Image (cartoon, helix red, strand yellow):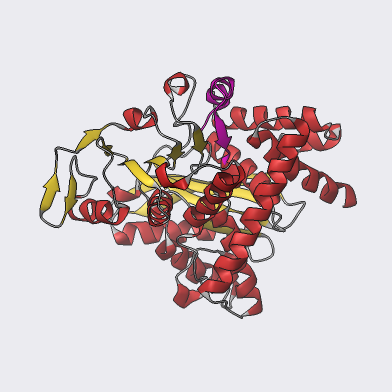
Amino acid sequence: MSPFHSALKQLTKAAALMNLDDAIFEKLKKPDTILQVSLPVKMDNGTTKVFEGYRVQYNNARGPYKGGLRYHPKTNLNEIKALAFWMVIKCSVVGIPMGGAKGGITVDPKKLSSRELEELTRVFTKKIAAFIGPDKDIPAPDVYTNPRIMSWIVDEYSNIVGHNAPAVVTGKPIELGGSAGRIEATGLGGFYIIQELVHKIKMSKKNITVAVQGFGNVGYYIAELLYKAGYKIVALSDSQGGIYNKNGLDMNPVNIMKTKENEGKISGCYCIGTVCDCENFKQITNEQLLQLDVDFLVPAALEEALNGKNAGKVKAKIIVEMANGGVTPEAEKKLLQKNKLIMPDVLSNAGGVTVSYFEWVQNLQNYYWTLEDVNTKLKKIMLDSFNQVWNIKEKYRTDMRTASFISALARIQEAMRLR
């Protein structure tokens, strides 16, 4: 099943349960605007290569379009449409006044030189400049994009419009108007959700085990925060595989990151400095990680990690979906039948877009907040959103994803009605 078809199934389930207005339901089944552009880039070897770029603006009833840009070889229009739709829901779940969009380029950025990557980014910015802007559509980093790429977009866009326009994107370096706390915001938001869930269902934090799939920005920070809070990290993985703590020993994500930085991947052993433990820690695949008997499983890589084929093998009690679309509808159906509790992406990973919203507000005001201010505001929004969704779940006797959609769709419906 395609990601966009999955998104529509989620919409349909929630709409039926809450009796969403038919006209609004039909409107939300399709994006407002689809932009597809060709991007010619002169390569270092003198040849010209043409890449494909996309920007899907899904709905702006609650505010300007908001959503990331991903540079990935498998990026396609179907995927971008789904991600744009989920951004609409995500912004509404946490109550920030923004709509949803998504964009990307079909490219493997690891195969480009720095100059080629910069030229590609600037060409893309020129092609979409008329469609984005601080009051129109505000991109941000996503898979394989980062503050450096956002800096190039700010520079190119500012040159086009003739004035400095830092609010055109979020996720920028602090020196160019970025917000304190933005880098770790997605992981921190997920951490707040887990903490509140543990409190809500009265789990004992002392012996809670966690496996995290994905060791990029999101996976690393949520693992580090959980470890520092006393949770037991038993498995971590990146795109090349993972490491499993088979004897219940502590696994410090900071040390795992040092190994990854030194070796280019997560080692098959647990290494601190030059000392490696290969007896108590063993190498595993990403699929094996998903099947571990743990309290919390955190898919934090790409979409569809849990699908119809492997969901039946999941032993984790609770799944915290930090990757967008990390659990397919087929997988979710099987997991719910086994009484698994799923914290959906549109709630769990909304910390990133929340602090992106903070960054945008700070840019418009030209007034910047401290890290403490940012994290205090983020925590309140995440906890308030969690509890509202939990109450809806109890009221409708449904799952957390459907409850999240009902919460979001109610706000979107009211905004569209008032308009």
* Rendered image quadrant of residue 108: top left
Q: Position of residue 290 (x, y in %)?
A: 39, 30
Q: Position of residue 282 (x, y in %)?
A: 20, 35
Left or right placement of residue 156 versus residue 16 in this view: left
- Closest to the observer, 130 or 174: 174
168 up-or-down from 294: above or below: below
- Closest to the observer, 51 or 167: 167
406 up-or-down from 125: above or below: above
Q: Position of residue 322 (x, y in %)?
A: 49, 44
Q: Position of residue 77 (x, y in %)?
A: 54, 37
Per the image, is 150 magenta? Answer: no
- Closest to the observer, 79 or 309: 309
Left or right placement of residue 301 versus residue 245 in this view: right
Q: In the image as oriented, which residue stretches furthest toward the right?
A: 418
- Closest to the observer, 230 or 121: 230
Count the marks.
Answer: 0
Q: Residue at x 78, y 47 (%)?
A: 412
* Rendered image quadrant of residue 160: bottom right
Q: Residue at x 59, y 67 (%)?
A: 376
Q: In the image as oriented, which residue stretches furthest toward the left?
A: 274
From where the camera sits, is residue 340 visible? yes
Q: In the image as oriented, which residue stretches furthest toward the bottom?
A: 367
Per the image, is 337 magenta? Answer: yes
Q: Which residues are magenta?
A: 326-344
